[in-house]
Image (cartoon, coloured by chain):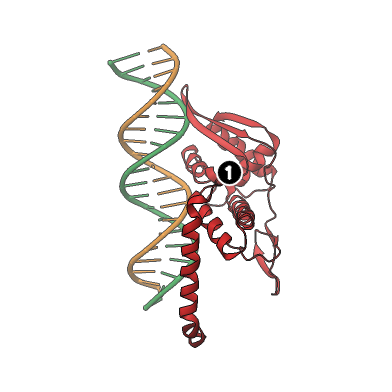
Chain colours: A red, B orange, C green
Amino acid sequence: MWEAFEKDRASIVGGALQALAKAMAIYPNVQLDKLPRMADFTRWGYAIAEVLGYGGERFLQAYRKNRNQSNEEAISSHPVAATVVALMKENQSWSGSVASLLGELERVAEQEKINTKVKTFPKAAHILSRRLKEVKSNLEDVGITFDIRHAGDSKKVSIQKSGSNVIPIRPQSGTLKLTGTDSIEVKDIELSEDYDEFEGW
DNA sequence: GATGCTAAGGTCCCTAATCT
DNA sequence: AGATTAGGGACCTTAGCATC
């Protein structure tokens, strides 16, 4: 394999540099309406996809799809995020102290059969606020925003749901289907996607 | 089995806001 | 001004895991 690689190495590196040079030329003209996090990466990805002939729009679609998948997995595997999502299925907004939120999340977790015995489920309010900050951006991506601020003698959490794009809680096991390979058993996710050159970006 | 590393939780102390 | 309350940050401890 390395022999074949060494044989083609010059062409591979040359091609990559040519693509990069072309992408650098059009990069200043790449203007996107809405830039997600990693905005610079998105612009470069768009420019490179354009010069490689795939089309920037196709890159954007694939990148968006991949980000959504990653986000859903992150939320599903995080007990606090999953419970907040479950809580906001019932409510358009929620507010109260961090301690009362912890109690509410324990109630919802029990209702939704989410395991609160795992180590990552907070047992104290200040641990909960840490956990919330960890998943703030993931929750924002599914339309849930929150704000923690001083109000009276306690910290008040205000959670808002925008739109109706709150994702469902995923099952605890499933099957990952890969094109061209046998299906493999995985934990926590179920994916079945058409092949796409940008998959995994 | 011993050792080292890493991540998470618990404890202590500090801060901010409110009450008396 | 001091006491009280709730939450955050820093530090320490502990459990789980990998490596030898």
Q: Does residue A201 appear in the picture of this structure?
A: no
Q: Determine whether, in the image, residue A30 is placed left or right of residue A89.
A: left
What amino acid is at disc 1? Answer: Asp
**Which one is nearer the viewer's eye here, A174 or A63?**
A63
Eyeballing the image, is A54 above or below A124? below
Residue drawn at (60%, 56%) of the image: A56
Q: Which element carries disc 1, helix, strand or loop?
A: loop
Residue A39 appears at what percent x and percent y? 50, 49
Residue A154 visible in the snapshot = yes
- x 49%, y 37%: residue: A125
Residue A143 spot, x, y in % from top left: 62, 40
Vertical relation: B17 (above or below) A89: above
Corner quadrant of residue A173: bottom right
The residue drawn where x is 58% and y is 36% is A103
- Chain for disc number 1: A
Is residue A117 found left or right of A21 in the rendered image?
right
Q: Position of residue A123 (x, y in %)?
A: 52, 43
Which quarter shows the C terminus of chain A? bottom right
| On screen, residue A188 above or below A166 | below
Q: Which residue is mark 1?
A: A33
From the viewer's side, name the closer residue of A161 and B16: A161
> Mark 1 Cα within 10 Å, few/some/many (few <14, many 20+)?
few
Residue at the image point whose x is 49% and y is 78% from the top: A11
- What is the count of numbered marks? 1
Return the x and y of residue A180 as percentages of the image width and height. Answer: 70, 74
